[in-house]
């Protein structure tokens, strides 16, 4: 994975104590106590046609579940959340609520102090629910069998909803664990412990879902075969490959994709054994860049610099995320683009040369002025794309694409019959867990409707 | 003239002369657990209370109380909306109580000290206890004819207070065997509060105080299927008090204040008084003093400071120089429905700058009232709520459910039509010919 960081010292070499490390990777936003949840629930005005519901990509009836919390009906609240979003527990942790439900809360109004803490309330309900049996029943077996590619949020949500409709599902997952980015890509302090795994276990309780690991489309799995063997296929692929800087030295020791480091960080049982970049440069402006920079700072780096080619306003990381980075001492350099990877005589990364940029007639242009930032490691977080081979088999190659993403209609149907797609791999994917869940859920409805229609036609 | 050293608060004289009982301020502690013994009463006086009604004395042997005595009706944030108790009258001997009362009155001569009494409905009982109470030097007595739990089963408390003839009789005995002011405390567990008030007046009462507590069950333990407070595996109804009963008490006070026979009868207002504003409301509806219990039980005696401060500042702002000056000022504006102006019209107005678009007014009006608010969606997707003036009946519901203060206001409309009561209204099939 991050073999080209092996020359770096280990986190533990700085003498940072395990306690400090543990504290640094504890819940970023600690859960509400029961009392806090009750008090916060009373702040909800139970709006009619509530704007928070409109803002929720997964259509959760937010005022209802908050009222249920206020009435001491935690299972009812959890059911309200999960019936729209079976991954409501992880969404409560990772959703950028500040640009979704909480941004639209009427209590943002000047006289109302601050929005209701919807994300934390959702977490309270899903953390404290207790069902003797899985809260959603599986319909009678339909005799249909659907393949789901990818056990990330889109695929899992699709599988669960298909199971509710009585269809048998097999999920084909390339990695060794389910969860997708929830398992491998979320900052460790945003989703702690083994929550991602537990959530998947809960989801699978519905029954009728089989998970196969190490199944990689374009490698040991072909779309043509899946298509032939199943009544429908849902593609919930992740974007496994990091974009390249396109510079000499791209593969030099000390330069690595941020996603790979984050993956290793999430899976690490001992944080002291991770490679540490005392002076660290992160290139990018999204939440992955922020997560990378902040986590490296929390691992004990002396100097973390995040560099972005445009201005703060253009960053895709939310203001809230930027604040987290700043609070952790991350330096933000804007209007600069990477020009050259600086290597020492062992061809290891020792820094990066940047060129200052500016906007000219709406286009980004270099000013010719350059500067260097010394770094033990440089992490790129400039976006993800499909792994090269994943859509390379003859049938997959036929999928119509928008840019490099898979093109779908409003029912998540691809250009191929019986093949559906959702999540980050489709054109409208926005790298949001909650949106991926919605795609998976709606695709499952479409698959179900299409199967029913075929049955009637037959 | 004011003879108190500490009745001046923020330059306003809060002292009262209530049916001949003088106190430095109108805030008295009601007869209840907080006034059960000298220790509590002295602490109350030290905290600044103008008077105390000593917890009800009875005949020996003293009453015996059960364990677990209170329960509450909680709001969503665990604020106590209403409070319930199943305590009886004092569970200490008459002798100890009388001794303590005597001492406290000696030590605190300028504070009102009233002794609550409940003995069987027999002349001999009253004839026996009244001279003993008189000897304490206390300023007056209050007849507990209202206790709704426990005591009525023994023929006392509300069992007396629900029978106007008995009220009159007991009051008469008291006036016969006791020379100082007699206050009759009324139970709300009746149908028309005017009847017992008139009976007290006929018996010679110097004043009435109300309300005593209301029969209540506050909540249940649904796991064990038993009400609260729980005694073992059982419960019983108790007496309800606290801010939830204030509206009931205000109405009963007003009923007596505007009833012709009792309109000049002094009233000590009791029931959910929790702050200065509550007190001012009771006074405005005719009370000459107020009695407080639950608020003190929840927060301690110190609350009287905020009450005195708030009331005196408000009085100064309004130019009232004494409690008496505004006592009863709202009584004449409280009338029977039939005298209301049928030509008065008010309609809701929504201040769009203050509106936060929560939609509560809309759904309340649409589902449960007169469909007088329109939900408009602007091109930006933002919602806008507007009153459909021709449909609005001025019911106040939208204003009540609106979470933003002063966002929805009720605006009286100029109709150009004169006052017209229902009795004058041509739509009234039973209209009196004029």
Image: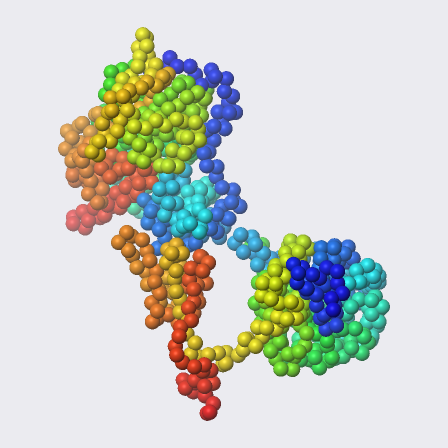
In the figure, residue B121 lies in which quadrant?
bottom right
Q: Quadrant of residue B24?
A: bottom right
Q: Is residue A35 visible?
A: yes
> Residue A88 placed where, x, y %?
38, 42
The correct choice, above or below, for B327 with respect to B6 in the image is: below
B112 vs A446, left or right, is: right
Q: Residue at x 46, y 36 (%)?
A: A29
Question: Residue drawn 48% across and 39% down?
Answer: A31
- Residue toward you, A343 or B310: B310
Q: Position of residue A25 (x, y in %)?
A: 46, 29
Task: List the single residue furthest toward the bottom.
Answer: B433
Q: Is residue A203 visible?
A: no
Q: Is residue B283 left or right of residue A282?
A: right
Q: Residue B87 at what x, y percent from top left? A: 70, 61
Is residue A14 toward the left or the right of residue A166 in the image?
Answer: right
Q: Residue at x 50, y 78 (%)?
A: B337
């Amino acid at each position: 994975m991050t073999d080209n960081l092996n020359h770096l010292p280990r986190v533990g070499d700085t003498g940072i104590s395990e306690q400090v490390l543990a504290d640094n990777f504890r819940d970023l936003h600690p859960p509400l106590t029961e009392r806090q949840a009750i008090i916060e629930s009373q702040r909800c005005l139970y709006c009619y046609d509530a704007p928070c519901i409109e803002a929720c990509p997964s259509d959760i009836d937010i005022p209802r579940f908050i009222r249920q919390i206020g009435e001491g009906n935690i299972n009812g609240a959890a059911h309200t959340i999960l019936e729209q979003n079976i991954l409501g527990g992880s969404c409560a942790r990772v959703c950028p609520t500040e640009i979704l439900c909480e941004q639209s809360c009427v209590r943002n109004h000047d006289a109302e102090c601050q929005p209701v803490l919807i994300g934390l309330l959702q977490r309270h309900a899903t953390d404290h629910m207790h069902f003797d049996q899985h809260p959603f029943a599986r319909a009678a077996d339909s005799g249909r069998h659907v393949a789901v590619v990818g056990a990330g949020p889109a695929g899992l949500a699709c599988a669960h909803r298909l199971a509710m409709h009585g269809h048998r599902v097999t999920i084909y997952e390339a990695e060794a664990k389910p969860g997708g980015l929830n398992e491998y890509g979320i900052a460790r302090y945003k989703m702690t412990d083994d929550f991602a795994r537990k959530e998947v276990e809960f989801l699978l309780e519905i029954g009728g879902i089989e998970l196969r690991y190490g199944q990689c489309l374009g490698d040991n799995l072909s779309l043509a075969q899946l298509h032939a063997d199943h009544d429908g296929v849902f593609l919930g692929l992740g974007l496994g490959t990091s974009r390249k800087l396109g510079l000499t030295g791209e593969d030099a020791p000390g330069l690595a994709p941020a996603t790979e480091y984050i993956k290793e960080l999430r899976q690490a049982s001992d944080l002291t054994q991770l490679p540490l970049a005392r002076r660290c440069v992160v290139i990018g402006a999204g939440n992955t860049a922020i997560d990378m920079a902040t986590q490296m700072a929390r691992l004990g780096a002396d100097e973390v610099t995040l560099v972005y080619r445009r201005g703060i306003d253009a960053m895709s990381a939310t203001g809230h995320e930027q604040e987290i980075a700043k609070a952790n001492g991350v330096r933000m350099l804007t209007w600069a683009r990477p020009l050259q990877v600086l290597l020492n005589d062992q061809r290891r990364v020792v820094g990066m040369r940047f060129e200052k940029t500016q906007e000219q007639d709406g286009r980004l242009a270099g000013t010719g002025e350059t500067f260097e930032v010394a770094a033990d490691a440089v992490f790129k977080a400039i976006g993800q794309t499909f792994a090269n081979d994943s859509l390379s088999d003859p049938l997959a190659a036929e999928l119509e694409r928008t840019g490099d993403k898979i093109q779908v209609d409003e029912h998540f149907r691809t250009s191929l019959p019986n093949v559906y797609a959702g999540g980050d791999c489709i054109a409208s994917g926005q790298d949001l867990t909650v949106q991926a869940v919605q795609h998976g859920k709606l695709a499952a409805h479409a698959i179900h409707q299409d199967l029913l229609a075929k049955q009637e036609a037959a | 003239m004011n003879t108190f050293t500490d009745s001046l608060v923020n330059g306003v004289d809060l002292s009262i002369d209530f049916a001949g009982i003088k106190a430095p301020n109108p805030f008295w502690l009601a007869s209840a657990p907080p006034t059960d013994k000298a220790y509590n009463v002295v602490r109350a006086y030290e905290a600044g209370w103008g008077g105390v009604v000593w917890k009800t004395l009875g005949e020996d042997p003293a009453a015996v109380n059960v364990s677990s005595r209170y329960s509450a009706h909680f709001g969503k944030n665990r604020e106590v909306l209403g409070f319930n108790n199943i305590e009886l009258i004092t569970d200490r001997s008459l002798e100890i109580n009388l001794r303590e009362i005597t001492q406290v009155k000696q030590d605190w001569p300028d504070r009102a000290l009233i002794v609550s009494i409940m003995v069987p409905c027999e002349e001999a009982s009253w004839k026996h206890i009244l001279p003993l109470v008189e000897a304490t030097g206390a300023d007056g007595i209050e007849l507990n004819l209202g206790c709704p739990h426990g005591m009525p089963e023994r023929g006392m408390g509300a069992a007396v207070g629900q029978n106007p003839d008995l009220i009159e009789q007991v009051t008469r005995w008291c006036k016969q065997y006791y020379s100082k002011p007699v206050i009759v405390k009324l139970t709300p567990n009746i149908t028309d509060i005017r009847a017992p008030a008139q009976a007290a007046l006929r018996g010679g009462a110097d004043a009435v105080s109300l309300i005593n507590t209301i029969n209540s069950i506050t909540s249940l333990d649904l796991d064990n299927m038993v009400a609260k407070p729980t005694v073992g595996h059982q419960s019983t109804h108790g007496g309800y008090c606290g801010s939830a009963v204030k509206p009931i008490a205000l109405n009963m006070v007003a009923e007596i204040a505007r009833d012709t026979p009792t309109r000049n009868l002094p009233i000590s207002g009791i029931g959910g008084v929790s702050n200065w504003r509550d007190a001012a409301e009771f006074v405005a509806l005719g009370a000459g003093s107020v009695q407080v219990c639950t608020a003190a039980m929840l927060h301690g005696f110190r609350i009287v400071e905020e009450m005195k401060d708030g009331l005196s500042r408000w009085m100064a702002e309004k130019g009232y120089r004494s409690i008496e000056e505004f006592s009863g000022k709202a009584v004449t504006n409280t009338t029977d429905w039939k005298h209301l102006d049928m030509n008065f019209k008010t309609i809701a107005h929504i201040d769009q700058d203050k509106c936060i678009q929560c939609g509560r007014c809309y759904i309340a009006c649409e589902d449960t009232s007169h469909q007088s608010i329109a939900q408009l969606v602007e091109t930006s997707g933002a919602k806008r709520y507007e009153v459909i003036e021709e449909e609005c009946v001025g019911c106040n519901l939208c204003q009540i459910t609106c979470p933003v203060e002063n966002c929805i206001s009720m605006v009286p409309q100029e109709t150009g039509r004169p006052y017209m009561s229902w009795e004058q209204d041509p739509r009234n099939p039973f209209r009196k010919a004029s």
